[in-house]
Image (cartoon, rainbow, N blue to C red):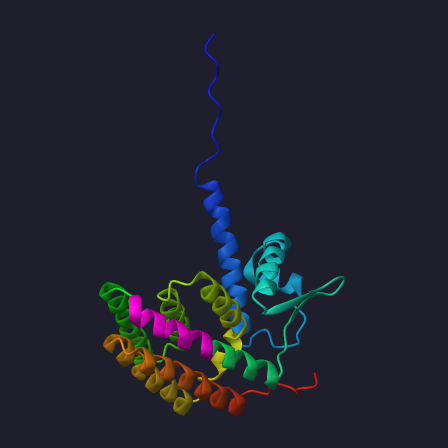
Amino acid sequence: MTPRAAVAAPPDEPIRRTRLHDEVVGRVRDMIVEGRLAAGERVHEGRLCELLGVSRTPLREALKVLASEGLVDLFQNRGAVVRKVTAKDVSDMLVVIGHLEALAGELACAQASDASIAEIRALHDRMMALYARRERMEYFRLNQEIHSAIVRLAGNATLEGLHATLQARMKRVRFVGNDTPGNWQGAVDDHADIIAAIERRDGAALAAALRRHMDHTWTRVSAVLDLGSDDA
């Protein structure tokens, strides 16, 4: 008698679960970045589940991911609380991000392929189109992608990992930094300098432009955001 073949699970089932997970993580992350979930606010799971149309299990898994990104803190018997950062937290992280990106920029200019640099240019052009339409959240996502792409071109996994961790923790703060037309225009001007330097493969100029961009970011965010006491 010929053995019966095992019945395979539907091939799309894991994909559906993955998509649900990613969607919930992305939606809650956006709510934090946009300030709909405020710093210091406890995440009300029941209310959020109702809003997103999901059960508590995928929401709790999403909160674990956001905790690993530094966007929420998880407390036993209290659930999740949107993380608050102090002025010193932000200043310290921006200094480190600036130096990481400066190093990445020098390495990228020395070793990245012409095609890879052209891809950075294409991302920049798409971002500028979003700026022209004032599509702020989509602009912000592409802005973050450009910074990550430059770091990837350095070809250093340790650098990339450190940068990704800090960039995730700074999402809300950096989004708020473009809260006024003047601040947003300033960020766009910074990116024009960044893209010009990488296209020239001028590592020193790119490193300086990236550090200057982080300095300007601090100026912008400290002016518009209540970061809380340094003693908090």
Place residue 105 in its image quadrant.
Answer: bottom left
Asked whether residue 179 is in view, the answer is no
Q: Is residue 76 magenta?
A: no
Number of marks:
0
Q: Residue furthest right?
A: 77
Q: Measured from the top left, where is residue 107 in percent x and y?
A: 35, 70
Q: Residue at x 59, y 69 (%)?
A: 70
Q: 94 left or right of 61? A: left
Q: Residue at x 32, y 74 (%)?
A: 127
Q: Foreground residue, 70 or 115?
A: 115
Assess whether residue 99 is covered by the magenta stretch: yes
- Image coordinates of residue 186 in percent, x first then y, are 37, 89
Residue 200 position within the rendered picture, expressed as x and y whole percent measured from the top left? 24, 77
Left or right of 202, for residue 45: right
Q: Quadrant of the C terminus?
A: bottom right
Placement of 189 over or under 93, stated as above or below: below
Q: Is residue 226 visible?
A: yes
Closer-to-camera residue (224/154): 154
The secondary structure making up most of the magenta span is helix
Q: Please tell me which residue is depicted at 62% across the width and 52% down the height of the picture.
A: 57
Q: Quick check: 101 left or right of 194?
A: right
Q: Going by the picture, which residue comes out furthest to the top?
A: 1
Residue 53 position (above or below residue 187):
above
| Magenta part of the chain | 98-111
